[in-house]
Image: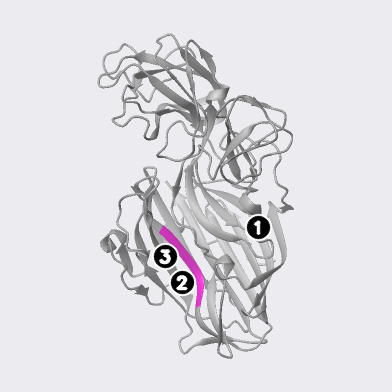
Amino acid sequence: MIGLELSPGHNLGARAGALPLAAFFRAGGGRHVALAAGQDDGLTLWTEVGQNHAACLRLDNNDPSTRYSWRETLIAELRNIYAVGEMALTGSWSQLQSSGSGLAGSYTGNRAISTSSLTAKAAVTVDRVAPYDVWVHYTGRTNGAYLRVDIDGAQTLVNEIGDPDGLGFKAFPTYHANDLTRRQSVKVASGLTGSHLVEVSVGGVASPGGNAIMLEAIAISGDLSDPRVLPPLWTPNTSYGMGDEVQWGGVFYAARANGVSGTVPPTHGGGIASDGALDWRADNRPTYPQFVAIDYASERKYALRFDVDGAFTELGGQTHGNEALVARNVMLDGAAWTPATTGNGLSVGAQLTLTEDLNWQTQAGAPLGNCQLVRSIAPGSVRHDVAVTATGPQADVAWFYAGMLPMVHWDGESATTVVATLDAPDATVTLADHAGVNPPNIDFAGASRLGLTGSVMGRGLFYGHEAGAVPGAGNVLDQFNAFLRPNLNARTASGGLDWAAKAYVQADNGAGLSFGSGDVIRFFNRHVMMVG
């Protein structure tokens, strides 16, 4: 097996001094990776990129005869979620129907509750061995009241909010200028350990505002090894309340009524359907954690275009195809992975390895080469190692992208700027300088390392990408350069549409690149992410 070492200098040969853009390849401090079933027989990979933050990678595989394609990367802040269904309620509360996920929605996914009663209380016991903070997830109201928080029957541990208007106790206002438009959260305590009872209630009428609060969940800090960072797996013959959220096969479902589940799990990918006893609404993402996209649906392992006797073929992932899957091996910490059937669906460890044996071929199906791709995932790092032995006729390469780096400058769902700048060893590009136009490619001669800088959820984002040849006899790859397409669709940083860009590290052997029987191709690309 090849390419399991993940150190920054692996397979690059001896170099004097620090590598270029070394700051973009720092470890983010995460400890875990995780694997779960994805939609349509795909996979979802998770890798921690910082304290309480993880990257979620979607690997699609709609056709089992083709390889997995890495389609997007989302960043999530991991929190253990205690949903309404786990709370002890006293007094008068209204139960609210769920309707969908997303930052711009309200009381969506997990059910929500609302009250204007000063005597109504909602309480839940939270628990974690490692230190944690506490948040209240709620929806702002034009008639939003003060929301009071007590921990263990007092407010001594409520150290992240104060007394806003001389109320005589700690609380925060839930007023929002636009009623029911955006889900929100407020940190109310930090530095806790062990078990504590968190209780919320109406703290009085707010001005501006009113006398009602709307509650969605209580949350504490989490990482991939914690049990509540994703909704639980669906289970048969189980009582659920309207709006309770579960997952199965990479799809997330919310119960449409109070009732008992059937015996066969839901399988629909959209809309509403039954498990034989209870109706479920399907969704692409869970309500929690909340996600921000840092790149878009585009493969990034490799892509190339070649010419055999005047016939052109493009190859690489599901975008281009022309790779026949021969064998696949999915390993977690050195053991064959089996999908989880209990808990939150995550299989957690320190190292994921996906090995795929593929046949490269022409568009007409003629053999071109035998390929082994090893995808290695460690905390904050994803690496592809590729080795190809040519078996077909001479192929002349028109272009060969050894590494691809999609990025989102403006994320329409969260309405925030994500990636702000791209760095090459001798240049920095500010993406905002290219608003509203699709300019020519920006070239970086001789570059094989790139770095992205941005922000997600109020924290800094650093993303390093590199590609290069793996030394070995007969390797036809040698030189590399890079270029950036800074605004693929001439977007502006506004509205609900993403501003997408993409960078490429390409093989460039001067007078031309070709390979045929007896030649080998060995290269790697690497993605390193950190939030901090």
Number of numbered callouts drawn: 3
* Amino acid type, label 2: Val
Q: CA distance from mark 2 to mark 1?
A: 23 Å
Q: Which residues are magenta?
A: 400-407
Residue located at (62% from left, 84% from top): 474
| CB atoms of marks 2 and 3 within 8 Å | no
- The residue at which mark 2 appears reads as 505
Question: Position of 85 compared to 432: left or right?
Answer: right
Q: Residues within 10 Å of mark 1 (few under 14, many from 20)?
A: many
Task: State the quadrant of the N terminus.
Answer: bottom right
| CB atoms of marks 3 and 1 within 8 Å | no
Q: Secondary structure at mark 1?
A: strand
Q: Is residue 56 above or below residue 95?
A: below
Residue 113 position, x and y percent, is 47, 22
Of callouts 3 and 1, the N-terminal one: 1
* Amino acid type, label 1: Thr
- The residue at which mark 3 appears reads as 502
Residue 220 position, x and y percent, is 50, 30
* Amino acid type, label 3: Lys
Does the image show residue 195? no
Question: Position of 203 compared to 433: left or right?
Answer: right
Residue 241 position, x and y percent, is 59, 25
Of callouts 2 and 1, the N-terminal one: 1
Magenta segment main secondary structure: strand
- The residue at which mark 1 appears reads as 353
Q: Secondary structure at mark 2?
A: strand
Q: CA distance from mark 2 to mark 3?
A: 10 Å
> As rendered, which of 225 and 315 lies closer to the eye?
315
